[in-house]
């Protein structure tokens, strides 16, 4: 007897439906074909034990299982449940007339209970697109899959529940989630709030500008100045995610298996990898490609603390994703693309000792040591960072002040207002959503300067020895400053403020 059941494979952030054909014939043997990996080949032992422990048998016949399309590599243990149900139906141990109307996925334990799988959300989206009636999966993944409306999503704890459902013995209720209610849970009380930060008004202003325009930012200052504290509070002032952004972000975390019984993500991700991270862990890849840290930070913040401590080649692989906002991983037989549109926030000490030209510090570094330390970060990478700001230690008077500073909720209101101006400005362009994504053509169109502003910019570039690459960055940042003020044109005051935020472009910065 031949029977067809359906599973799904995830490549990148998209799913592909897999047809599992189970054929029973005279003889004895178990043949699994269609490019399965070792985890799938070993499934026969898990299936046999799970069936035996639930009162069923592995049939003593010749079992041939084909996983189509046969030229597509299948990986992971999530096909255990698919194969087990296929074997039971093909051997007539259970009757399931509608088994071909459902996607069935799950890893089996030896007692028949189910373990969680990766990529439940992309699989559910594909199942709905292809007109399947429902989706069976482990109960731990049910919340992420139930985001998809128009598909019956059943969270099950063991194989017996699926068998009872098809035989009409048990009642399984599909899980439903009100996606919009889940999404619009407000975040008015962030864990890390700017009201906790004493002093540092100029740095807070910088953070507000970076958040409003989606600009990459680097903080330079001695140990204990508050660089990490400020960076951790940046997500609390970013505008709320749109529903489309939330779905994109949830999909990536679903593929990586990081959702942990959570439905739709409504908080922007904040990723802070250690400086010992490898190239593959940062940008993604591996023999079975998985998203890296830059994709996990999609629509959120990637924080690189102590930037010069990262290996130079690790930082260099970020250059192309920072520009293209996606990363493509190529293998001999396939290519996968992961989105990686994130805000880069980096911090560093100005010298190996951490204290730069500080007369009170016993530790000093020679100009040569400082130059060598800073040269670990390449010019092309700095070129992609819009704002450079020096962070100075907070004086005692500010630290001991009991007054509460401005809260993240108040700052976020201004940031959101500025982002709305940018959204309406770029509504006809699908690839540009905020100022940091502008190309040369957009800069010419939206950053027109009057004679005074042009003269100011020219003077600054000549007197402060600013590099040519700083020109575009200054214009982008000044456009964001103008948006925060709600003014249509970029003025001299906006240019003047933006010029201050290019510390590392000044040739005499180390002097």
Image (spheres, rainbow, N blue to C red):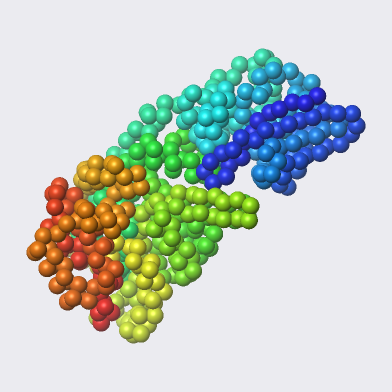
Q: Where is 26 relative to 223, above or below?
A: above
Residue at the (48%, 65%) spot, across then down: 314
Q: Where is 443 relative to 391, above or below?
A: above
Left-right relation of 74 to 304: right
Q: Is residue 351 visible?
A: yes
Provide residue 354's location: percent of width, then percent of height: 34, 74
Left-right relation of 109 to 470: right
Q: Quadrant of residue 426?
A: top left
Residue at the (39%, 72%) spot, across then down: 378
Provide residue 472's location: percent of width, then percent of height: 26, 63
Q: Quadrant of residue 71?
A: top right
Q: Where is 461 relative to 187, above or below?
A: below
Q: Where is 177 relative to 199, above or below?
A: above
Residue at the (73%, 31%) spot, across then down: 21
Query: In the rendered image, which quarter contains the C terminus?
Result: bottom left
Q: Nearer the viewer, residue 443 or 422?
A: 443
Provide residue 199's location: percent of width, then percent of height: 21, 59
């Amino acid at each position: 007897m031949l029977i067809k059941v359906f599973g799904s494979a995830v490549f990148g952030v998209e799913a592909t439906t897999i047809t599992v054909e189970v054929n029973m014939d005279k003889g004895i043997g178990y043949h699994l074909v269609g490019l399965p990996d070792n985890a799938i080949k070993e499934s026969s032992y898990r299936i046999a034990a799970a069936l035996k422990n639930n009162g069923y048998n592995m049939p003593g016949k010749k079992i041939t299982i084909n996983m189509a399309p046969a030229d597509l590599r299948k990986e992971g243990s999530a096909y255990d449940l698919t194969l087990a149900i296929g074997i039971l139906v093909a051997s007539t141990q259970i009757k399931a007339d509608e088994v071909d109307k459902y996607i069935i996925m799950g890893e089996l334990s030896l007692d028949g209970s189910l373990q969680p799988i990766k990529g439940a959300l992309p699989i559910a989206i594909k199942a709905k697109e292809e007109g399947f009636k429902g989706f069976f999966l482990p109960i731990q993944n049910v919340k992420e899959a139930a985001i998809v409306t128009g598909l019956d999503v059943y969270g099950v704890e063991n194989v017996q529940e699926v068998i009872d459902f098809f035989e009409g013995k048990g009642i399984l209720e599909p899980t439903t989630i009100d996606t919009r209610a889940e999404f619009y849970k407000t975040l008015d009380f962030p864990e890390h709030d700017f009201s906790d930060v004493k002093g540092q008004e100029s740095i807070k202003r910088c953070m507000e500008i970076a958040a409003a325009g989606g600009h990459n930012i680097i903080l330079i200052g001695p140990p204990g100045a508050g660089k990490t504290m400020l960076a951790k509070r940046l997500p609390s002032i970013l505008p709320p995610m749109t529903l489309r952004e939330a779905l994109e972000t949830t999909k990536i975390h679903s593929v990586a298996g990081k959702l942990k019984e959570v439905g739709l993500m409504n908080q922007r991700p904040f990723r802070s990898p250690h400086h010992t991270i490898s190239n593959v862990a940062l940008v993604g890849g591996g023999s079975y490609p998985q998203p890296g840290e830059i994709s996990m930070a999609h629509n959120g913040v990637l924080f690189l603390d102590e930037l010069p401590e990262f290996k130079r080649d690790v930082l260099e692989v970020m250059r192309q994703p920072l520009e293209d906002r996606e990363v493509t991983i190529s293998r001999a037989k396939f290519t996968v693309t992961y989105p990686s549109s994130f805000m880069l926030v980096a911090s560093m000490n100005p010298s190996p000792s951490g204290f730069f030209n500080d007369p009170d510090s016993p530790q000093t570094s020679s100009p040569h040591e400082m130059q060598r330390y800073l040269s670990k970060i390449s010019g092309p990478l700095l070129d992609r960072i819009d704002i450079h700001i020096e962070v100075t230690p907070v004086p005692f008077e500010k630290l001991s002040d009991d007054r509460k500073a401005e809260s993240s909720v108040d700052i976020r209101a201004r940031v959101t207002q500025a982002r709305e101006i940018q959204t309406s400005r770029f509504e006809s362009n699908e690839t540009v959503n905020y100022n940091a994504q502008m190309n040369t053509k957009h800069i010419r169109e939206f950053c027109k300067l009057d004679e005074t502003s042009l003269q100011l910019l020219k003077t600054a570039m000549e007197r402060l020895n600013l590099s040519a690459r700083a020109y575009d960055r200054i214009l982008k940042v000044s456009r964001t400053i103008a948006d925060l003020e709600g003014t249509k044109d970029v003025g001299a005051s906006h240019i003047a403020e933006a010029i201050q935020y290019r510390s590392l472009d000044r040739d005499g910065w180390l002097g």
